[in-house]
Image: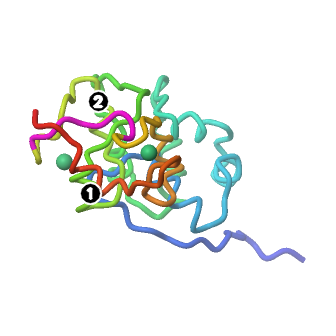
Amino acid sequence: MTPPDVKPWLFIIQPYEGESLSHFLGRFRRVNHLSTAGLGNLAGIGAVVVRWERFHFNPRPSQKELEVIASLVEVDVQRLAEMLPPAGVGMQHEPIRLCGACYAETPCHQIKWQFKETGGCDRHNLRLLSKCPNCDARFKIPALWENGTCDRCRLPFGEMLFYQKPT
Ligand SMILES: [Zn+2]
Ligand SMILES: [Zn+2]
């Protein structure tokens, strides 16, 4: 006999202010030991999660897809939509960009750093970094930012602020 409506027991995490969907989903998957495919299957939306974690939002996630993910991660669907670029805002998939000063305050990748129109951080008046200033390695997709450091030389993202030039 199977109990009705079996829902897997999942750890719930709180989104950070401005956090990108890629970074949020990566954190959620890690605390729950889920692969991207595993999360997609659990939500019943298949492989699109992989595309979202790479900032490929064309076609945009549908309302239905956002609703199933929102219910799974227990975040309000409106709040989840804020982790996406607003309609009409161009996205830059690569390179992944970072304001180290912001990261030192709030340890997450912010969605606005990938907007085409964003040149620098308007909070710190610093130019964004598009690679590690110490070893020149490109940043991985934010879903994989497990340690908060450069993947090659291990320089913490929060310390990269000392290399950022003013806008
Ligand atoms: Zn900043
Ligand atoms: Zn590095």
Percent x, y of residue 165: 16, 37
- Badge 1 is on which residue? 17
Q: Quadrant of the C terminus?
A: top left
Quadrant of the image occupied by residue 2: bottom right
Mark 1 vs 2, N-terminal side: 1
Identify the colour scheme used: rainbow
Percent x, y of residue 55: 46, 33
Three-letter code, disc 2: Phe
Three-letter code, disc 1: Glu
Q: Judge from the rendering whether residue 139 lies leftward or rightward of residue 144; answer left or right.
A: left
Helix, strand or loop: magenta stretch: loop
Q: Residue at x 60, y 38 (%)?
A: 50
Magenta run includes residue 65:
no
In the image, the segment drawn in magenta is 125-132
Q: Residue at x 48, y 50 (%)?
A: 153
Mark 1 crowd level (few <14, some 14–19, many ≥20, 10 Å Cα): some
Percent x, y of residue 19: 34, 51
- Badge 2 is on which residue? 115
Magenta run includes residue 127:
yes
